[in-house]
Image: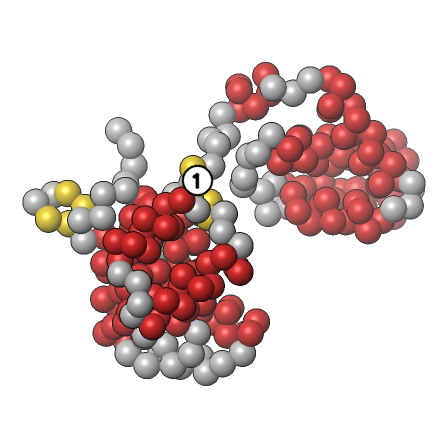
Amino acid sequence: MNAGPRFLAIEDILALHAIAIEDQGGNPSIRDRGGLESAMAMPRQQFAGAYLHPDIQAMAAAYAFHVCMNHPFVDGNKRAATAAMIAFLADNGWAFDATPDEAEPMIRRLAEGNLNKESFTSWARTQMREKPKMELREFFSRIDSRSFIERFTSLVVAETGGTTAEWNKRYEEALPAMPFLGELAKQQNEARQSGDASGYNRVTMLLIGMITLYAIAEDQGYEW
């Protein structure tokens, strides 16, 4: 049995709005709490046991539409609307491919009342795609030894050859998807400080191997 959609909570939209305001400025206050709650409830509405918005794409577009139309915040409504749509998609295994320059005019038309819900949803659907599922058997079957060795070798050079910036960038990218890398990095540092060359090399190779797999997954189009 398939799990239902993962809907956003009020706390989610408040956090997204706060990030947008901190990044781009504006008044962080809520103008209409009831309007915010109404907008966030719309994508999950049902009638006779069926969702009024029939799929993930329609639900995502509904977040953007109703946040824009209800203007619940003093500032940043368009940013919050876009962020809510993208966050809901991400939580449910979908991505939004429109660039900010492509999305901004459509969101502005929504906020101005110049685009109806059906038209916005039709456009938004063209920008959405379902992300590939991370099936481990399929993933490993698609890895060939040559690509693995090439990736692994480049990371060895980055970690041991002095290109610290590249290594740090790869490590920081992979860490949210692989939290255990933090423990490996701690063990690596402890081995370095204690002069345990064998332990340091062993943990370093583990780190590089795991980050290599992460990089290959990205090459294959997987998103974490």
Q: How many marks?
A: 1
Which residue occupies 91% across, 40% down? 161
Quadrant of residue 65 within the rendered picture: bottom left
Left or right: 210, with 55 as reference point: right
Q: Is residue 9 above or below residue 215?
A: below
Left or right: 25, with 163 as reference point: left
Q: Nearer the viewer, residue 96 or 185?
A: 96
What residue does disc 1 label? Answer: 129
Report x, y in % for residue 62.
Answer: 29, 56
Quadrant of residue 209 within the rendered picture: top right
Report x, y in % for residue 150.
Answer: 79, 26
Image quarter in which the N terminus is found: top left
Q: Is residue 80 above or below residue 178?
A: below
Coloring scheme used = secondary structure
Residue 211 makes an appearance in the image: yes
Identity, as a three-letter code, of the amino acid under mark 1: Arg
Q: Nearer the viewer, residue 83 or 119?
A: 119
Which residue occupies 34% across, 72% down? 112
Report x, y in % for residue 33.
Answer: 28, 76
Q: Is residue 85 above or below residue 137?
A: below
Quadrant of residue 5 within the rendered picture: top left
Label 1: which secondary element: strand
Report x, y in % for residue 109.
Answer: 37, 67
Q: Residue furthest left?
A: 48
Which residue occupies 54% across, 41% down? 224
Q: Residue furthest front?
A: 114
Left or right: 29, with 196 as reference point: left
Which residue occupies 26% across, 61% down? 116
Crowd class of label 1 (few under 14; some 14 to 19; many from 20; radius 10 Å) = some
Residue 202 makes an appearance in the image: no
